[in-house]
Image (tube, rainbow, N blue to C red):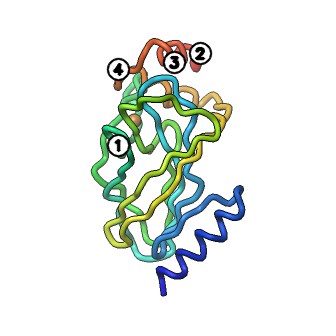
């Protein structure tokens, strides 16, 4: 019965492009999104809303050499990314993945992502199981001053050996 309900939600949301959402058990995955890339890494963002008991996001997979759960953390003036083995999803709560915080890190891209691209991935929840989602590549939103400091493009350049273009982009994000 749960599987049927999940399938129906997917059909409905596929028909409505604006409502881009997936469901597995009591968990909804809202609007998985990524931004155009310039280097060999990309980051994915989404919101996880849980209407049931506590769960954990324990993995993510996609067709790239390395895919991990990361969290950007501020250490003085430096933004660092830390690998997370699992993300706690609280009972009747939500977790937001956003630039400067939690993100899905895709590494070893062989092609740049452009507007309109769709990046399939699978999220694995400890209790609710796996769910296939698509990260849609959209325009990077304007960052406000606070967010600009932890703009994800900064540490892409620092930590993942991105190419020269990524370094240029990093500089722009600071102006
Ligand atoms: Cu990262």
Residue 172, which numbered label? 2
Q: Are marks 4 and 1 in contact (CB under 8 Å)?
A: no
Please identify, in this view, whether the residue under mark 1 or under mark 2 is nearer the observer.
Answer: 1
Q: Secondary structure at mark 2?
A: helix
Q: Judge: label 3 CB < 8 Å from ligand 1.
A: no
Disc nearer the start of the sequence (2/4): 4
Q: Are marks 3 and 2 in contact (CB under 8 Å)?
A: yes
The location of residue 136, given as percent across then percent down, is: 58, 46
Q: CA distance from mark 2 to mark 4?
A: 18 Å
Q: Secondary structure at mark 1?
A: strand
Q: Which residue is mark 1?
A: 67
Q: Which residue is mark 3?
A: 170
Q: Secondary structure at mark 4?
A: loop
Give the answer, above or below, for where 36 lies relative to 122.
above
Q: CA distance from mark 4 to mark 1?
A: 15 Å
Give the answer, above or below, for where 23 lies relative to 43.
below
Disc nearer the start of the sequence (4/3): 4
Q: CA distance from mark 1 to mark 2?
A: 26 Å
Disc nearer the start of the sequence (3/1): 1
Q: Which residue is mark 4?
A: 161
Q: CA distance from mark 3 to mark 2?
A: 5 Å
């Amino acid at each position: 019965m749960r599987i049927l309900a999940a399938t129906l939600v997917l059909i409905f949301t596929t028909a409505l492009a604006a409502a881009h959402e997936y469901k597995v058990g009591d968990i909804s995955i809202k609007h998985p999104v990524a931004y155009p890339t310039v280097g060999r890494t990309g980051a994915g963002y989404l919101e996880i809303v849980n209407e049931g008991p506590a769960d954990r996001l324990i993995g993510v997979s996609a067709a790239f050499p390395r895919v991990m759960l990361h969290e950007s953390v501020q250490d003085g003036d430096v933004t660092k990314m830390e690998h997370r083995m699992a993300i706690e999803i609280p009972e009747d709560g939500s977790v937001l993945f956003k630039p400067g915080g939690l993100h899905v890190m895709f590494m070893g891209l062989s092609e740049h992502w452009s507007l309109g691209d769709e990046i399939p991935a699978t999220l694995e929840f400890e209790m609710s199981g796996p769910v296939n989602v698509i990260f849609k590549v959209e325009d990077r939103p304007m960052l406000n001053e606070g967010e600009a400091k932890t703009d994800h493009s900064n540490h892409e350049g620092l930590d993942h050996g991105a190419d020269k273009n990524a370094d240029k982009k990093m500089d722009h994000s600071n102006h």
